[in-house]
Each structure stands twice: as C-alpha cells, then as structure tokens.
Amino acid sequence: MKMINFFLSFVLLIVCTSPLLSQVNGPVTIEGKQFKLNGANFYPMVMNYGVELTRQQNTNWNNSYLTPYVEYGVNAGPNGGPNSYFFECNNLNQCKNDIIADWTYLVSKGFNTIRVAGFYTKFQDNPNKLFFKCRESYMDLEYYINLDHFTPVDPGCTFILDQYENLMQIAEAAGVKLIFNLIGTNSQFTQFPENNNDEIEFYNAFFNLLASRISISPFANSVLAVDLWNEPCYEDESNKKDKQETCEIVSTWYNTFKSFGTTPLVTLGTCGSGDIWFYDPGVLKVDFFSLHIDPEWRAFEDKTDPAIQQRAISRVYDELYWFNKISPYPWIVGETSLAASANLQVLPQGGANGTLADQSNYAQLIMDATCSCGGSGFSWWWFQDGWWLKDFSEPHPAHWGILERGYATGVAIAEKPIVNTFMNYTLPSVVSSCGPYPISTSSLQSYIPTLTYFNPYQHPAYPSKTIKGILLDQDGNPIANAYVGGHTFVGKVSGNEIHSFHRFFTDAIGYFEIIPAPKLLINPPFPLFYGELHTLLLTSAGGERRKFSAKWLSSTCSSSMPAAGTSPHTWQMKQTNFAYIGEFINIYVVNGEYRDVEAKNQLTIENSIIYAGATSNIRAKSEVHLKSSVHAQSGSLTHIYCEETNINCTNYNSYTMEYKLPGNPLYNEEVDKLFLELQFNIKKGSSGFTATPNPANSFFNCIVNQMKKRRLTC
C-alpha cells in the first residue's frame, strides 16, 4: 500500500446563534454542536423546575396528581417553619393550570426548555424494587407508588407513565421543550449485569417502558432529552467501579432509549472534573452532556476576602474551558447558580452567595462564557426560592431561584433583577475567545481573576511541599488538561480534622504543580501530614488512574507519596483520546498491532506511521485531515473514512483502580529499524532523481528532475 496523503473538508456550523423559542411541533436534533428544530438553529435556554405527585387526604395512590414543587407559589411551602409543608393548589386541574402558568411565564422571560427536577423513580434494596416517592397534600408525610416494571400492565408503571404523558401535554400547551431527569438518588450499582435483582437492570427495564411510551405519544416531540442520571459524582455510593464498568452502565441505558428512535436525545448531568475518577465524561456514551458547576468557596479561603467571589467564578470558567477541551460530545450548562435574596441576608458574601446585583451579573457572565467556551445551551438552578434542605444555619441553598419568597403568608412573589438579565439576553453572533486562557507555569503565583487554570485556589508558593509532575501518554506525547487532585490536612474545627480537596489541570506539555492548601490555626502538637499533601490522584479524559495516599491506605493505591520539593516526576499513562476534535501526533502502529484512531467530529493526524503488518482505522464523522508527515507502509492495512463514531467501552477494560510507585520508569518501546527497498517508476522525459538525505533514518525527500522539480515525501 502506498503512502497516503488524505484530506477531507466539510463546513462546520457555528454554535452560538440568536436564541429561538421552542416550536413543539418538531423534534430537537443535534448536528455537530448545533441543536436544530424544524431545520433552524435552536439554543436551549433551560429552567430547572420541580414537580411532585400528591393526593388528597384519605384517597388512594391512584388518585395522585401532578403539582408544582411544594415550596413554589405565594403561600405554599413551610407555614411557620420548614417542617410543616403544604401545597398551594389542591386539585388536579388547579395544579395542572399552575404548572402551565409557570411555564408560560418562563417562556415570556426567555426560556424555551424545562428540566423537570425531582420527578424520578428510586430503587430500594432488600427487597429489590423500584418505587415513586410522593408527598401527602395535607402534611409533610411521604407515600410510595411501587413499580413492577417486568409486568407490562403493572398498574403502578402505567400510572407513572401516564404522568410523564401529562407533563408532555402540559409542555405543548405552554410552548416549551422538556428534559426528564431519570435518576437522582444515592445508588450502589455494584453489580453489572448479573440478574433481575440488579439495580441497573431494574432502571433499564423502566427506561424501556418510558422510551416506548414517549415514542408512541402524540406529544413525543415535546421531549428534547432524557437526563439519565443527576450528578453521579455525588450519588454513586459504591466508589468501586472502573471506567469500563461506568461506560457499560451508561451505554446500556443509552442504547435502550435509542432502540426506539433517534429522539429524544440522551444526556447526563455531570459534575465536570468532579466526575472524572469514576464517571469520566471522556468515556460515557451520550448525545450531549449537561455540565453542573457552581461558584463555591473552600474551607481554607477567607470569607471576608473581597476577591473570593471572583475567584470562585473564575474556577467556573476553568471548568467550562476544561470541559470543552476534553468532552467528546456537545455540552450545555445543566445547572449553575449564585444565591441571593432581598428578604433574607445570604451570608457569607462570596463564593456561592452574593447580592441581587451579584446574582444578576453572574448570570450574564456565565451565559457569555458558556457560549464563548463552546457550549450549546444554558440552564439555571432554579425557579423559586424556598426552604430547601430545611436548613437555616447556611441558607444559601434556598436562594438560588429567580423569584423571591416572602417567608410569610400573603407576601407577594417578587422577581429578582436576574429575570431581566434572562429576558434581555442575546447570544453572541460570532464565537469569541474563551474566558480562562491557561497561563504559563512561570505565572502561577500571580493573581489574575480570569487566569486561574493552573492554580485555581491561588495557593501561595510552598516550594518544599509542592509536588511537580509531567504526564505523558503511551506514545510519549504530553497529556494536556489532565486532572490532578490532592488532599491536604489543613487544621481542626471543634476537634474534627478538616481536609481540603482541590484540583489542578496540566498545561500543554503535561506539566503540573500541586500546591498544598494553606494551614489553618491549630494547637500543637501538630499531627501527621499537617499542611502537606497526603493524597494525590492523576487521571485524564479517557485515561488510566494513578492514586497515592500516605493517610488513607488501601490495596488500590500506593502508600508511598511522590516526593515534594523536587524536580518534576514523570508518569507515562495509558489514554484513549476520543475527543470531539481529535489531534494526534507521533502515532506508531507496529507490526501485528490493531489500532483505531478516531474522533467524534473532526480528526487531524501528523508525524505518524502505520508500519507493515499493522492495521488501523482512521475515522471521524465530519472531517479527517492527514498531514504530509503521515505514512502507511506497504503491507499495512489502513482504512480512512468519515462515519459516525462512538465510545467503545472495551477500550478501557484495563483501567482498573491501578497505582504505580513513585519513580516508576517510563515505558519506552523502541520500534525495530526497518530496511526498505524502494522502486521508482520515472516518467519518460525525466532526467533522473535524487534522494536526500541518504542514508536516512526516518524520512527523506525525493526530487524528480523534470521541467519543474516535484518534491515528494516518501
């Protein structure tokens, strides 16, 4: 097979366009990173809105009906405290009309999609079953609707599916699209797939029923997407799975929905870098991701520091930038917020809390940054303030809404200034630069609010306790935007140890510096690991994991921490680099090896060789670029084409919870030198040719002496 110099070019669609309101009569699809509705560009502007099931006193569960979340409305929610809930509406038709009114109101404020929050099945262990948790209308008590998802005519399943149908009908009446959140509770997921007692299989069976119902519903086009799981980083309690297992779980559910058609789309509510250790966005099969990220402060940060809020927002920018770099699929912001209220003072100011002006400004900034960083849609958490979590000691979770609560019967609902921000927002017509440009390692200690990518918490220099490293992939190329996590013991509060967890990212050459969090005040004697890193985690999107811990010992991590205060350590780690836009250099597929080189949408390869006896598939959906430094030798089998590509879970079957000792030698496999005999057929009229340099170790130029010199790469 002769050398290939291959170039395919397609037109890419611009992501950020003017937002369009929903037209429910068509399905939402996605082309590249652009959502489409009825052939036009569509930018999802999403509000998270809570929905519940309730029933009147002394009635059966099959008389339950949909209602807005108990804390919505003028007089609803807690009456005299957070332990006495009641609903504002009290019958099926009134509650339905209240939902329609709220959703119609949101359309008038610039939203075109509702993410239905808090409405999902739950799993109970021993005996294993799925159920739906509901709230009594007359007191703060719960009741349950049990689901036998293996019985086609089960009354519980039929009733719940009817409620999904009702939500779709309400969405059509209000003129909005829907995203259904399907799992949002703590789970184990420790078996896969084994038998019908497995939680994964229970959910999958119900998903099969729901997908079937949506596919035949006259209101099917109202469903933009199903969100498989809300924030697995918080909800998966097992913490034992490897990346292949989580890939298989999500792929199973994805394939179930897709067996009934290409729509609705499938998403997952990821915590971004917080998910990468188990639920790595680089290995999960979806149509698009929903990124959940909020500004927050850490225990070692001074709440009175006037810069704390800007630093927290800068870290949100960092996550947007990082996610766009590593995600193989399009993404939207699925949840974000900043708490503020005119009725109660939200303290401390900074981080996730602020003034009404802070909240409004944050919404503007984060919407612009989402578009600038390559996002395809935006969501806000959430509709109206309440007594969420029933916690008065730290009230900020209750104040993420765009509407106030009076906290007293009869006090009218007031719009916060953020409502005008959403109503007047116009997306940029041209993609601008992303906010958080990564900075050079020489500038790590310089505080620039929007440049915190390599030192997100702006830790002061601590050279003797700083761990430095360089991450390389199996081909010896640097791994940029890898995840570096660390635990620091920073002090004690009321006798309890305070550990700070923080993350860093690698730069273009795979380099990182992880600096311990500053120490808090503590009385001597100082305990072990005080003020130094005692745990280190290394991984990347689609990459294996390395874990070191001198404090939390287990069979899955090294008990020997890499030395701090030294020259950089170097680790070479396996990585399957499946990206939306893939860029590969220095790929060498050797004799007897089979290797796919893929990307989701666009692929560029340079300085790479497929050797004789090797097999390689080179493919992406829209574009494949092979530069002149890419070579396929005679005797290799090389396929280059454009087609749909997706995550292959078996690519990660060796990514167990692995660890390597510090100083582990690099894995360098030399490719055997090959001596090739080349024959050239020279056109008549040529006076000969020369090859330089000669002899050559890798590449040489062939110059054919004709009327014009033609330079060929051989």
Image (cartoon, rainbow, N blue to C red):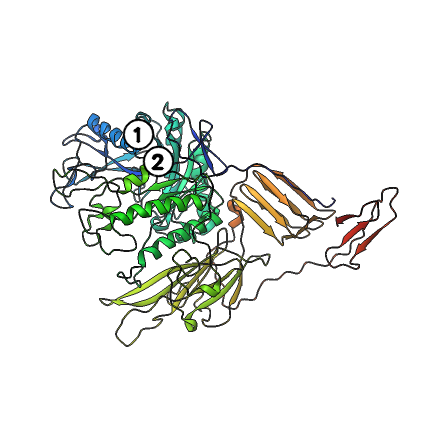
Say which residue label 1 marks. 167
Which residue in the rendered view is the most extreme toward the top?
Answer: 218
Residue at image position (30%, 55%) is 351
Amino acid beneath label 2: Phe
Q: Quadrant of the N terminus?
A: top right
Question: Is there any visible trace of residue 197 in the rendered image?
Answer: no
Label annotation for residue 310: none
Helix, strand or loop status at disc 2: strand
Q: Nearer the viewer, residue 485 or 101?
A: 101
Helix, strand or loop status at disc 1: helix
Residue at image position (35%, 35%) is 180
Left/right of residue 29 with respect to residue 109 in the rendered view: right
Q: Is residue 518 above or below residue 402?
A: below
Crowding near the residue tagged with mark 1, few <14, some 14–19, many ≥20 C-alpha atoms within 10 Å: many
Q: Residue 383: where, in percent of width, then height?
A: 27, 39
Question: Is there any visible trace of residue 550 in the rendered image?
Answer: yes
Q: Residue 451: where, in percent of width, then height?
A: 42, 57
Q: Is residue 169 above or below residue 83?
A: above
Q: Nearer the viewer, residue 204 or 65?
A: 65
Left/right of residue 361 with respect to residue 656 in the rendered view: left
Q: Residue 549: where, in percent of width, then height?
A: 41, 65
Crowding near the residue tagged with mark 2, few <14, some 14–19, many ≥20 C-alpha atoms within 10 Å: many
The quadrant holding residue 695 is: bottom right
Residue at image position (17%, 31%) is 89
Say which residue label 2 marks. 180
Amino acid beneath label 1: Leu
Q: Is residue 63 above or below residue 313?
A: above
